[in-house]
Image (spheres, rainbow, N blue to C red):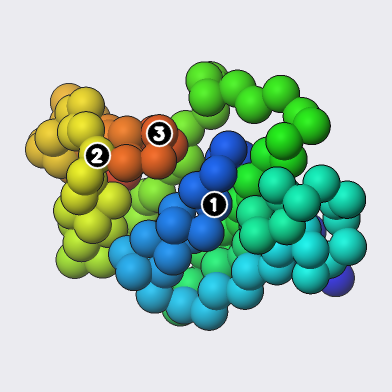
Amino acid sequence: MTSRLNPYLGFRDDARQAMEFYQSVFGGDLHLGTFAEMHASNDPADADKIMHGQLETPNGYLIMGSDTPSSMQYSSTSNISVSLSGDDADDLRRFFAGLSEGGTVLEPLTKAPWGDEFGMLTDRFGVTWLVNVAGA
């Protein structure tokens, strides 16, 4: 079996909305399981929260996410960003535009000093994305 590295995003109460948003941007198959469905919490407040979400996209991306249970501390700050890069300019530009809807563009997608197109944004769920389109 091949090893994979993929982001696992943490949310307080909006993992379902976030994962559905990412599916609208990237496409693909989304599977969501709640704490109740997975018998992972006895707290009724957690029943409908997402215990595990997984999005597999046509591009081969694998994005996972979950809500933080009520019994655990949630930190909304992180020193991690999700990076998208490659040479499919149309897809990457479309992803940048989609992810920025309702979010904050930190650096517009423009020609960078190293010759590629580069942009940064924080989406509406607080996740920072870096997008790099390889130059010719």
Q: Classify mark 1: helix, strand or loop.
A: helix
Number of numbered discs present?
3
Mark 1 lies on residue: 15
Instruction: Tell me the CA gap for discs 1 and 3.
Output: 12 Å
Relative depth, front residue between 76 and 122: 76
Picture residue at 40% right of the left edge, 40% below the top: 125
Spot occupied by residue 23 in the image (x, y as percentages of width and height): 42, 68
Q: Looking at numbered disc 2 in the image, what kind of residue is underneath it?
A: Gly
Q: Which mark is residue 126?
A: 3
Mark 2 closeness class: few <14, some 14–19, many ≥20 residues within 10 Å: some
Please state if 57 lies on the left or on the right of 27 as rendered.
right
Mark 2 lies on residue: 103
Q: Quadrant of residue 39?
A: bottom right
Please state if 100 lies on the left or on the right of 130 as rendered.
left
- Circle 2/circle 1 CB separation < 8 Å: no
Q: Classify mark 2: helix, strand or loop.
A: loop
Instruction: Tell me the CA gap for discs 2 and 1.
Output: 16 Å
Spot occupied by residue 90 in the image (x, y as percentages of width and height): 19, 66
- Circle 1/circle 3 CB separation < 8 Å: no
Picture residue at 20% right of the left edge, 62% below the top: 94
Picture residue at 87% right of the left edge, 55% below the top: 40
